[in-house]
Amino acid sequence: MDGIHQGMGIGKKIMSECEEWARVNGFNSIRVRCNGKRESAHRFYIAIGYEERKWQKVFDKRLFI
């Protein structure tokens, strides 16, 4: 969410709608992926009931310089 729109309840409303759609369509869970550096997003997801399940790092190697 763009910083100017944070704290307005928009993200919470969007996630609530996604969750309802998932329930209606037979899903029993939702998984959200979030960049490890986005600590405010992590706090947001925890605040709306999500649990951290995994911490992941990505490694790249350039083959051509």
Image (cartoon, rainbow, N blue to C red):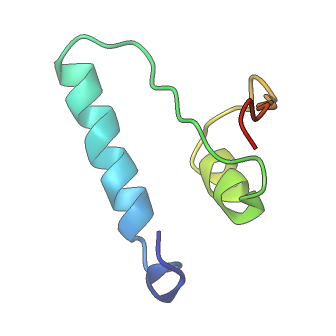
Q: Position of residue 17 (x, y in %)?
A: 26, 46
The x and y percentages for residue 47 are 65, 53
Give the residue at the far bottom of this rendering.
4
Label tally: 0
Residue 28 left/right relative to 25: right
Q: Would you place residue 46 above or below residue 62 in this image?
A: below
- 12, above or below 1, in the image: above
The residue shown at (71%, 65%) is 40
Q: In this view, does 28 lie to the left or right of 26?
A: right
Residue 36 lies, in percent from the top left, at 76, 47
Residue at the (21%, 32%) spot, across then down: 21
Q: Position of residue 27 (x, y in %)?
A: 32, 13
Direction front: furthest residue: 65
User: What is the quadrant of the C terminus in the image?
Assistant: top right
- State which quadrant residue 60 falls in: top right
Is 17 positioned to the left or the right of 30 in the image? Answer: left
Give the answer, above or below, for where 9 lies relative to 32: below
